[in-house]
Image (tube, helix red, strand yellow):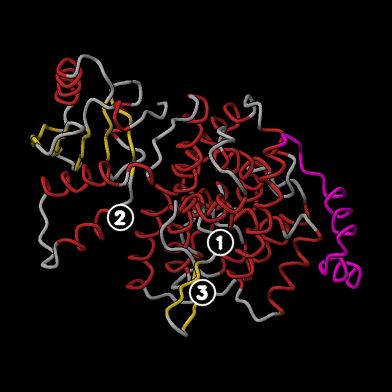
Amino acid sequence: MERVAQEEFAALVGLDWADAKHDVCFQAPGTARRAFLSFAHRPDAIDAWVHTRRTRFNGHPGAGCLELNKGPLVSAWRTDDFLVLFPVTLLTVAQYREAFTPSRAKDDPTDAELQGALLLKHRDTLTPLQPQSPARRALAPRVEHRRRLVGDTVRCTHRLTSALKNYFPQVLQWFPEQDTAIFCDFLSRWPTLKAAQRARRSTLEGFFRAHHVRAADVIDTRLQAITSALALTTDDGVITPHVLLVQALIAPLRVTLQAIADFDNAIAQRAQDHPDFPLFDALPGAGAVFAPRLLVAFGEQRERFASAEELQKYAGIAPVTERSGKKSWVHWRLQCPKFLRQTFVEWAAESTRHSFWAQVYSQQQREKGKAHQAAVRALAFKWIRILYRCWQERTPYDESIYLRALKRRNAPLLHNLAHLS
């Protein structure tokens, strides 16, 4: 969707979307007259609305303002060149509404009119939606869905841990990683300590070998632990309901783990074919999980961010400073793409295990009194500046080059590296 001058738009459209219907406010440039209508959230109704507007304005493009940059409406109109979409945040519309409606009265047609007014009066401050390539658009939801599945796994394992601590805590020591197939399968066959101790030694040995536990000493240690374990409780009123809960949680956990594996395969196939993938695959700690997420985070439109500072602010990594009179305070950015910020923060934390300077920098921030999350965000802030240049110049990251650059600038971080090395 190319940028078009405001006077070239055939109509300015404000859209207030909802699950069941969408309210629309029309206004032609140069006139004060506004028209209102609504249409149902159905594919045929959406297509009919676009066809009617295109016919009315002889195929000339219109500008649409809406509180979405992705979703059903955006997907439906992505391949249509009639509307140039200008996304705004929910907070922008809410504060614009409250500025002129102190009573805080709200209605869907009124919100559509407000979005049309934003487009009319503040068009120069809005950025049109520029869709990425089909390959990148296919990869983005994959990495986001995978991360949500990981969150589901964490919630499920936490509930399992809580239930097992009430009657079978030993199994948590035998299997320190609960998000594994062997853990699920063991509890499915032997959900209680009594059931595990009744099993034959040969049966347990066969179970471990079938799950790729080949070391004889590891198998012997686990078998001895099972034999010598003492039950926390023998109260059937405690054990039976928790066994039912454990079995109920094991089933979705197993399905989720398989879904994550399926997503990993699909993501790898998509990401490795992308020309920018080597830039992110070379990063310390990126690996099969974070390299595709970072590829999606930066995207393909190198003109989108004029500087690393713009990306730091957009991603919610750069802090916000507020001043009023003699007061000044700094806080983290509340309005930002949350998954984008999560990507940079989680990878920055992982990078401390693979990059020596990143580990030292994080420790340096902690010594200044910053909390763990604040220290990780500070590291992510620094990483974005480095990655932005690599991305712009299409040059893979090389830690030795970065350390030489620190030496040329006589950076304080280099002195800490020398002190700890």
Considering the image in quadrants, where does the C terminus appear?
Answer: bottom right
Are discs 2 and 1 less than 8 Å apart at CB? no
How far is disc 2 from disc 3 in space, using C-alphas? 21 Å
Does residue 387 appear in the picture of this structure? yes
Q: Is residue 44 above or below residue 259?
A: above
Q: Is residue 418 above or below residue 45?
A: below
**Horizontal placement of 51 versus 107: left or right?**
right
Q: Principal SS element in the magenta part?
A: helix
Does residue 226 appear in the picture of this structure? no
Q: State the image coordinates of residue 178 (x, y, percent, origin top left).
A: 55, 57
Query: Badge 3: how crowded within 10 Å, few (<14), some, or many (20+)?
Result: few
Q: State the image coordinates of residue 334 (x, y, percent, origin top left).
A: 42, 63
Badge 1 amino acid: Ala
Badge 3 amino acid: Val
**Horizontal placement of 383 versus 43: left or right?**
right
**Residue at numbered disc 3:** 330
**Residue at numbered disc 1:** 318
**Residue at numbered disc 2:** 92
